[in-house]
């Protein structure tokens, strides 16, 4: 859309904002648009690198005047799709952070990642309720509800949100909280996309005096026996213990670190918010299940919770495909189906097959976060140098069909992966909540111009 009139108006926009304004033919555009997935070559008509809330307001109003769809990117960890045309608002420059240790809150700019927040909160013996990957952006995680290594003890990350600043689709900056725009506040805690451009979020921080956490890695020949042992153990642990079991098959390609290429291992991840004296006895049955190649479970500083899952943080050149289903109960029937398909003797092109024990028994505030009925979360990830979406999708379909009796109706939206827009509405929320979310989107983003967050 590089007409003379558009170029002239973009130049005027650049005079009104403090961040960069880049048109499609600008040589700096590719660097500004680049996110977590390096193979995506985004090509918006215009980028606004927002450096203030006022920049976001100006950008949204410009997009309305020129009938542009609006895409939002902080870190680019969302579903990997190319942005073609329209406006891209990048929020990485909205990086202000304020920790109020007395009030136990963090006020977080929309461009920040969880690692920065966790590092700032830890000296006060406080922690944000984050996901497993500290390199993920705060806003996208919380808008989707957000489940992490403290899911069973502390619930969804969005349960800890106390206030949101957002520019609506009509270009108005508003605050959403329990007392201001409460319906929008309900939607922003789990309703994901399409309400506006979040500029700032305030969250309550958790007081965690001690954490015993980490992971154990087992060789391929022990996968089946340890999975069975973990399954029995997970059914009986206290409600505060969160864990997961991930079968990891690494392709033999140069993009994978040399020690892991072509290997298959089982990783057991555990988080117990308790001192070692209380937690060691809880974890002991896992240590007795089989000899571990690596055992890194022990007392852990709050700022190092990312070591539990050890998710990579650097931008990746690899293609990724993912999907997930909530599981109501992990009985022997489900587990044996999983072992026969993906265990030590199974064959699959998928890189990671994981079961997370995430069922929370806490009283939680009313919010749009769906998928609370699942006690476990079954998720898969396929990683490859070239796109293999159809191969990964076809490989998982038979298991999903056979395991459907164990599947819950809804799954947390952040984990859904590659599904259509209609399937998101059906699988992430109840019909009543989906209808309520749709009505709120129509009110605050009536033209449907703001299409997503990455």
Image (cartoon, grey):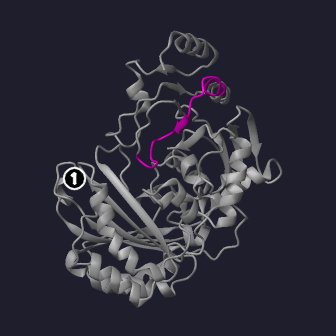
Q: Is residue 431 magenta?
A: no
Q: Residue at x 59, y 75 (%)?
A: 373
Classify 10 Å Cα crowding around label 1: few (below 14), some (14-19), many (20 and above): few
Foreground: 117 or 246?
246
| Vertical order, 451 against 361 (above or below) | above
Q: Residue at x 57, y 64 (%)?
A: 426
Q: Is residue 62 magenta?
A: yes
Q: Position of residue 243 (x, y in %)?
A: 46, 73
Foreground: 373 or 117?
373
- Per the rendered image, the range of residues in magenta is 61-80
Foreground: 163 or 58?
58
Q: Position of residue 332 (x, y in %)?
A: 40, 90
Task: Residue 200: name its quadrant.
Answer: top right
Residue at mark 1: 257
**Left or right side of 21 for 289:** left
**Left or right side of 282 for 425:** right
């Amino acid at each position: 859309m590089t007409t003379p009139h558009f170029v002239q108006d973009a130049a005027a926009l650049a005079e009104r904002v403090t961040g960069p304004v880049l048109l499609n033919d600008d040589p700096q555009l590719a660097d500004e648009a680049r996110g977590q997935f390096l193979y995506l070559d985004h090509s918006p008509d215009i980028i606004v690198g927002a450096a203030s809330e006022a920049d976001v307001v100006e950008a949204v109003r410009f997009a309305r005047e020129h009938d542009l769809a609006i895409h939002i990117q902080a870190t680019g960890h969302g579903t990997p799709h190319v942005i073609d045309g329209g406006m891209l608002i990048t929020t990485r420059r909205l990086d202000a952070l304020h920790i109020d240790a007395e009030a136990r809150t963090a006020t977080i700019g929309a461009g920040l990642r969880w690692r920065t927040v966790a590092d700032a909160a830890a000296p006060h013996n406080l922690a944000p309720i984050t996901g497993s990957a500290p390199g993920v952006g705060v806003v996208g995680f919380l808008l989707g509800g957000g489940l992490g290594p403290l899911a069973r003890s502390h619930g969804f990350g969005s349960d800890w949100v106390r206030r949101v600043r957002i520019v609506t689709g009509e270009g108005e900056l508003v605050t959403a909280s329990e007392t201001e725009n409460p319906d929008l506040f309900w939607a922003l805690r789990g309703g994901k996309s399409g309400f506006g451009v979040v500029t700032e979020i305030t969250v309550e921080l958790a007081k965690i005096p001690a954490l015993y956490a980490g992971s154990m890695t087992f060789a391929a020949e022990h996968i089946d026996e340890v999975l069975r042992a973990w399954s029995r153990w997970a059914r009986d642990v206290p409600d505060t213990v969160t864990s997961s079991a991930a079968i990891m098959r690494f392709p033999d390609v140069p993009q994978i670190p040399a020690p892991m290429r072509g290997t298959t291992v089982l990783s057991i991840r555990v988080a117990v918010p308790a001192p070692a004296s209380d937690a060691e006895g809880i974890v002991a049955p896992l240590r007795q299940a089989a000899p571990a190649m690596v055992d890194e479970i022990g007392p852990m500083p709050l700022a190092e919770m990312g070591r539990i899952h050890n998710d990579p943080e650097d931008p990746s050149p690899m293609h990724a495909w993912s999907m997930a289903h909530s599981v109501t109960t992990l009985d022997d029937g489900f587990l044996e189906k999983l072992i026969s398909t993906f265990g030590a003797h199974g064959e699959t092109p998928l890189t990671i097959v994981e079961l997370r024990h995430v069922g929370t028994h806490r009283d939680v505030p009313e919010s749009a976060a769906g998928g609370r009925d699942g006690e476990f979360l079954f998720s898969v990830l396929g990683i490859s140098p070239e796109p293999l979406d159809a191969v990964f999708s076809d490989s998982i379909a038979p298991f999903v069909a056979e395991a459907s009796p164990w599947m819950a109706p809804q799954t947390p939206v952040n984990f859904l992966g590659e599904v259509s827009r209609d399937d998101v509405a059906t699988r992430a929320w109840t019909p009543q909540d989906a209808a309520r979310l749709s009505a709120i989107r129509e009110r605050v983003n009536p033209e449907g111009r703001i299409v997503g967050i990455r």
